[in-house]
Image: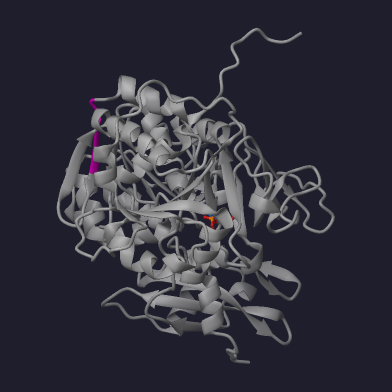
Amino acid sequence: MLGLMQDRPLALPHVFHRAEQLFGHRRLITAETSGERVTTVADWAVRVRRLATVLDSLGLSADARVGTFCWNTDRHLELYLAAPCTGRVLHTLNIRLFPEQLVYIVNHAEDEVVFVDRSLLPLLWPLVDKFETVRHIVVIDDGADHEIPSDPRVRDYEELLAAAEPFAGRFTVEEENSAAAMCYTSGTTGNPKGVVYSHRSAVLHSLITLTSDAFALSERDVVLPIVPMFHANAWGIPYGALLAGAELVFPGPNMTPEAIVGQLERHRVTVTGGVPTIWMGVRPLLADHDLSSLRAIICGGSAVPRSLSEAYREAIGIPMLHAWGMTETSPIASVSSRRSHQEAWSEDERADARARQGQPVPFVDLRIADPESGEELPWDDRATGELQAAGPWIAKEYYRGEGGGTQFTQDGWLRTGDVASVDKWGFVRLVDRTKDLVKSGGEWISSVDLENEIMAHPAVAEAAVIAIPHEKWTERPLACVVVKPGQSLTAEELIEFLTPRVAKWWLPDAVEFIDEVPKTSVGKFSKKTLRDKFAGYTLPS
Ligand code: ADP
C-alpha cells in the first residue's frame, strides 16, 4: 500500500519563492572593494528573475553548466538561485586553484559561460582562450578598476540585467534528482573530481542546516559565511539562510581578519563559519571588539585545535561549533554540538568533546571499517578505521565516472579517506587523513593530535606535522612550527612541553621553525607543499 501524500519535488525553486514571498524585508549586505552594499531579499529576488531571463537570452543549453568565479557576494547568491531554478547547473570555480587545474575543470564540466567578479578578472582572463566550451564571460563590476578586455565574448552583468524582463511566474524543476550544482574537489592527489549535487540533495542538506543540533539557522539570525561560496557551496549556508529567512552578510573581497571582525561587530552577526586558519587570524583581535551577538562559530574543513576553540570561549564566551564533512558530503555530515550526556561534565571534558568531529546529523550514516578487510569496527572509542558515509546528500560517484569506483564500497558507501574512531555516543574522533598519518614502527601517529598539542603551547601560532621517511621506523614526525610574533621558542623547549602530553614515541624527531604554514586553495594546511619543501630532509639519528 502506498502513502497518499502529494509527490512534490524537493527542488531549489521552493527556496527562492519562499524567500521572495516571506522574507522580502530581510537584508543582504555585501562588502565591496570600497564600502558596503545593502539590499533586500525583495530587490535581490527581482534581480534573480531578470538573471533567469538573461541565462535564456545568452542561448545557454537547458542543462548548461554556469561557471562562477566570484567572491562571497549577493550577486553570487543571485547566480546560486537563477542557474538551478532555470534547470542549469551552478558550477562554482575555486578562485585560488592553479591555472592548469582551472582550465581542466572548466573544460571537464563543459561550462558554457563564466560569471566573474571584475576584481578577479586578471586571474581568469589569461586562461579564457584555453576554455573549450565557454562562449560568454560575464563581468560583475565589484568596484575594482581592472581593465575590461574588449572582446565579443565579454558581457557586462548589469547591462544584461537591465535589458532583461524579470521572469514572471513560478520556477519549476520537476525532476528532483536533476543536477543543481557542482563543485570539484581540490585535487590534492590527481586531477580534481566533479561532485554533482541534485536539487533533492541541496534541499535536504539545507533543511539540515536549520536543525537545532546542527546550525539551527533561523529567521532571527544574521549569518556571515566566510567559507567561500566555491568551497562546497559555503557549507550549505547560503541556501540554508535563504530557506530560514536569515539575513546574510558577505565579506566580498575583503578577507582580512580586520575586515571580518569589523563586519561581525557592525552587523551584529549571530552565526558565522570558516576554516580554522581564518579563526587563527581573527583571534588576536577578539579583545578589541564587541562580538556579543555571536551564538555560533561554525568551524571545520580541518581539525579545530582545542586550544583555538578554548581561546574563543575564554575571550568571547563561545567555543567553536566543530563540524566535519567533505565536498562529497555536501558537506555537512557530523556536528559536535552539546548533548545531554555532557551536562554533568567539566568544562575541560566538554572541550575534549568539542575537539571531536561530532555526531552524524540526521539521515547521514557513518561507520568505520578495517581498510583491508572492509570489516565494520565497533564504536568503542578505541578501534580506528576508515570513516565511511552514506546518505541522501552523499556522492555516489564522480562526474563522468572519474576516479573509478575506488572511493566507493561495494555496497555504495563513500570511502572518505579519513581515519577515525567513534565513541559509544556516536561522536567521531578523526585521527587523521590516511595520507597524513605518520606510520612509525607498524603503529600510527596522528599528525592532527600532535599538531593540537603543539598548538597548545602559548608561543605557537600554528604548526603542521609531516612524516619523514626513516630507515628503522619507516616514518617519523617532523614538526613545522610558526612562533607567534614577539615570542621565542626553541626545539628543546617545545619537546619538553610535549613530553607529558603525548606518548614518548610520538615526540617529533625534529622541529623546524618556519614563517608560515603553507595553505591550500581553501585555506587548509597544505601538507603536500610541506612534504615537497622537506623532501630529502635528514632526521637527526
Ligand atoms: P579537500 O580534500 O580539498 O580538503 P574538502 O573540503 O572536501 O576538500 O575536504 C574534506 C576533508 O577535509 C575531509 O576528508 C577531512 O580530511 C578534512 N576535514 C573536514 N572537516 C574536518 C574536521 N572537522 N576535522 C578534521 N578534518 C576535517
Which corner quadrant of the image does residue 159 belong to? top left
Q: How is the image coloured?
A: one colour
* Left or right for 517, reference 339: left
- Furthest residue in direction left, as rendered: 35
| On screen, residue 202 above or below 527 | above
In magenta stretch: residue 26: yes
Percent across and percent down for residue 124 are 38, 65
Magenta stretch? 25-29
- Furthest residue in direction front, as rendered: 152
Percent across and percent down for residue 252 are 28, 52
Residue 369 visible in the picture: yes
Q: Give the quadrant of the N terminus.
A: top right
In magenta stretch: residue 148: no
At 41% from the left and 21% from the top, the residue drawn is: 170
At 32% from the left and 20% from the top, the residue drawn is: 22
Which of 389/343 is in front? 389
Which of 207/312 is in front? 207
Residue 326 visible in the picture: no
At 59% from the left and 49% from the top, the residue drawn is: 195
* Left or right for 296, reference 257: right
Which corner quadrant of the image does residue 192 belong to? bottom right
Percent across and percent down for residue 223 are 32, 39
